[in-house]
Image (cartoon, rainbow, N blue to C red):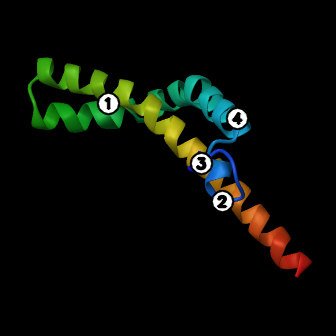
Amino acid sequence: MHQSPQRGSSGLSAAFNPLATLSALFGAVFVGPSIWPAIEPTVWQSLTSQYDHNTAFWLAWCIRIGTLPLAFTLIRLALLIGFTSLTAFTARRLM
């Protein structure tokens, strides 16, 4: 019988932790857009030096929209690594 990755004792069960998902979603929605104004001038300068104004505008919007799933993925990955390292550290201490 095939088990889903959410069940069982494998390391993948931590990847589907609802706390990690909700924390990453919260961070992507509320923290991600607040970081964009800090990097926007650098991105805009880089794009306008390579492309015309209209193309740079659309590329900047694509990058801005792309930062939301990127922030979600990075926050979720950081939480997963944190949970995994705490579990490994606890298991090592108990040995």
Q: Which residue is mark 3?
A: 5
Tell me the CA gap for discs 4 and 2: 16 Å
Residue at x 60% of width, y 48% of height = 3
Tell me the CA gap for discs 4 and 1: 28 Å
**Mark 3 or mark 2: whose residue is earlier in sequence:** 3
Q: How many marks?
A: 4
Which residue type does callout 4 highlight?
Answer: Pro
Side (left or right) of 17 relative to 68: right
* Mark 3 neighbour density, 10 Å: few (under 14) some (14–19) many (20 or more): some
**Mark 3 or mark 4: whose residue is earlier in sequence:** 3
Which label belongs to residue 21?
Answer: none
Residue at x 52% of width, y 32% of height = 35
Element marked by disc 2? loop
Tell me the CA gap for discs 3 and 4: 14 Å
Which label belongs to residue 18?
Answer: 4
Q: Which residue is mark 1?
A: 63
Tell me the CA gap for discs 1 and 3: 32 Å
Quadrant where the C terminus sits is: bottom right
Residue 56 spot, x, y in % from top left: 18, 25
Seen from the viewer's position, the closer of residues 32 and 77 is 77
Residue at x 17% of width, y 31% of height = 48
Which residue type does callout 2 highlight?
Answer: Ser
